[in-house]
């Protein structure tokens, strides 16, 4: 039996909300699914199987109400909007990602906030109820954060790039989601992006 491979693309549009487009690798057929027509400005979005049920959900940072939402996929590309963190709290998030930061076998949410340039993570209790933690604040305009086991101790650390202090920092994870800041080096160039697989 020939397998069909599907490419899923997530588009962010400033005025039309989140759109998830799927196209078959062996077909020109394409379908666009609007996750939300009400959220008229999306600052960041990330596709991940947040509830680990075998389909891709979407996390997004919403400009209009300034909080983080995730859209649960029922497997048939019907999406239900839910909150990450406190829906009444303003986060100002402009970057989103996801990783298991506390080694409890579920996916947490990683974010960068324009509020004091904080790096935040939202702890998933396994039922997609989230508690937010501050990794570091006053981080000099962090432009990117990624998770990787930098010190090879079995947990995911974080590293970040900064445009203002021209530095690459890494945050050592103690295995419980508590982070200690280290610095790789200072450079004389603005660092925009670093990524690890």
Image (tube, grey):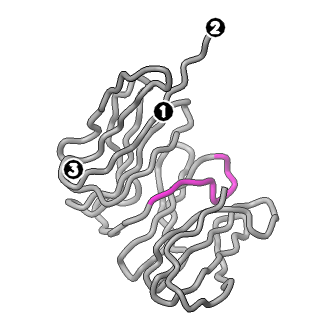
Q: Using the image, determine if residue 148 lies above or below residue 98.
A: below
Q: Residue 118: x percent and y percent?
A: 45, 77
Q: Which residue is mark 3?
A: 39
Q: Examine the image and state in which quarter residue 116 appears.
A: bottom left
What residue is shown with label 1?
7
Q: Quadrant of the C terminus?
A: bottom right
Q: Position of residue 117 (x, y in %)?
A: 42, 79
Q: Label 1 neighbourhood size at 10 Å, few (<14), some (14-19), many (20+)? A: few
The residue under the point 40% across, 54% down is: 84
Residue at 39% across, 52% down: 45
Q: Which element carries disc 1, helix, strand or loop?
A: strand
Q: Please tell me which of labels 3 and 1 falls first in the chain.
A: 1
Image height of 186 relative to 195, above or below: below
Q: Earlier in the sequence, mark 1 or mark 2?
A: 2
Please tell me whether mark 2 sits on a helix, a strand or a loop. loop
Q: Is residue 83 above or below residue 144?
A: above
The one nearer the camera, 161 or 99, is: 161
Q: Residue 64 in the image: state x and y as whole percent.
A: 20, 60
> Which quadrant would residue 75 be assigned to in this image?
top left
**Gap between marks 3 and 1, in whole Å?**
25 Å
Which residue has dot 2 on it?
A: 1
Foreground pick, 118 / 192: 192
Spatial separation of the CA atoms under disc 3 and disc 2: 41 Å
Give left or right: position of 197 versus 119. right
**Comparing labels 3 and 1, the label whose residue is closer to the camera:** 1
* Span of residues in magenta: 96-105
Category of crowding for the residue at label 3, using alpha-carbon neighbours closer than 10 angstroms: few (below 14), some (14–19), many (at least 20): some
């Amino acid at each position: 039996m020939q397998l069909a491979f599907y490419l899923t693309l997530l588009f962010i549009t400033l005025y039309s909300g989140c759109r998830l487009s799927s196209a078959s690798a062996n077909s020109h057929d394409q379908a666009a699914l609007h996750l939300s027509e009400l959220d008229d400005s999306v600052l960041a979005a990330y596709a991940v199987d947040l509830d680990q049920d075998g389909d891709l959900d979407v996390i997004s940072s919403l400009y209009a109400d300034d909080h983080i939402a995730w859209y649960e996929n029922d497997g048939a590309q019907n999406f239900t909007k839910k909150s990450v963190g406190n829906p009444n709290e303003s986060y100002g998030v402009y970057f989103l990602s996801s990783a298991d930061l506390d080694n409890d076998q579920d996916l947490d949410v990683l974010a960068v906030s324009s509020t004091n340039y904080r790096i935040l993570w939202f702890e998933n209790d396994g039922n997609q109820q989230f508690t937010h933690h501050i990794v570091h604040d006053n981080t000099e305009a962090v432009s990117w954060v990624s998770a990787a086991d930098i010190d090879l101790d079995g947990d995911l650390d974080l590293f970040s790039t900064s445009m203002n202090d021209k530095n690459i920092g890494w945050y050592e994870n103690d295995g419980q989601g508590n982070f200690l800041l280290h610095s790789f080096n200072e450079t004389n160039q603005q660092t925009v992006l670093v990524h690890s697989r």
